[in-house]
Image (cartoon, grey):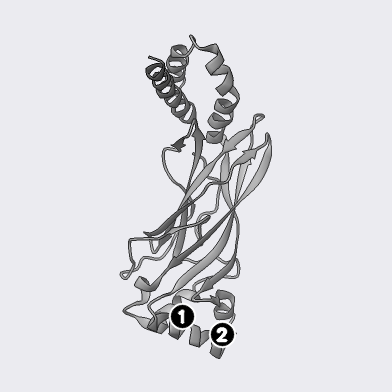
Amino acid sequence: MFVLGFLCKFAVVKLLILCLMKRTLVAVIVAGSLLCGSCTFLDNLANNLSSIANLANCEYTLKDVSNVSVAGVNVKNVTSGNISATDVVKLVSAITTKSVPLALNVNINVKNPTTRSALLTMMDWALDIAKTEFATGVTNQNYNIGASTTTTVPLGVSTDLYRLFSSDGLESLKTFASSFNSQGTSSQLGLRIRPSVSVAGQTIKSPSYIQIMKPAVASNNTGTTGSNGSVGSTGSTGSTGIRRL
């Protein structure tokens, strides 16, 4: 009976959190009333529930992109025209060895405009290349975004781009590397994020991904399967305006 009671309470709490994140007032009242018989249980979760619900009010924007490299070549060398013989060797080697690693760091600003703190415990990311999902990953670090403050969440991604260039070779790879601008973004790359929270060992994700950067160029030679990176995500040009859940 104890286990059954706990599972019932957990199910209702999960419903309450989802309702709070979606800000459905009637559903929140119904779910909350089901828990009124366990004040201790509610007391232990009250603070977290408030912070979790407030995550829906936060704003997500791109801060910057840095340390972008393709096959070990800094893209700034390509875009500035300072590509060296060593860089060319690296690019050629990447094609012949069928391994074209992409790596970059992205900083995302999470702004909490309210008077209550917001809790972020996980963030999924999805890397889009030429409007097709290419890689996914997650960062599991906890962030407590204080009232009326902005917290920077760093994401880093590394994935293999060989499938993009297996048919077109070196010139296609050089064209891709040169698509990055001085801010480290590219018209061919997009980034979507999905903030999440963890309660009682269970992950509760936001309803949908938030578009942080949007790819502007379509392509016919894009792969569709990505590798799970460690912490991280990547970006392109396109919209960098405020995005909410």
List x then y, in percent, for residue 128. Answer: 41, 59
Q: Residue furthest top?
A: 37
Relative to 233, does residue 16 appear above or below in the rendering? above
Please count the marks in the image: 2
Relative to 113, does residue 217 appear above or below in the rendering? below
Residue identifier under label 1 = 174
User: What amino acid type should be assigned to the residue bearing mark 2?
Assistant: Ile
Secondary element type, mark 2: loop
Residue 73 or residue 192, whichever sits in front: 73
Say which quarter of the image contains residue 216.
Answer: bottom left
User: What amino acid type should be assigned to the residue bearing mark 1?
Assistant: Lys
Secondary element type, mark 1: helix
Tell me which numbered mark, 1 or 2, is placed earlier along the sequence.
2
Cβ–Cβ below 8 Å for labels 1 and 2? yes
Residue identifier under label 2 = 83
* Label annotation for residue 22: none
Badge 1: few (under 14), some or many (20 or more) residues near its Cα, within 10 Å? some
Residue 143 or residue 21, whichever sits in front: 143
Relative to 56, does residue 50 appear above or below in the rendering? above
- Is residue 119 found left or right of 206 in the rendered image? right
- Is residue 17 found left or right of 112 in the rendered image? left
List x then y, in percent, for residue 162. Answer: 38, 73
Identity of the residue drawn at 48% across and 9% down: 37
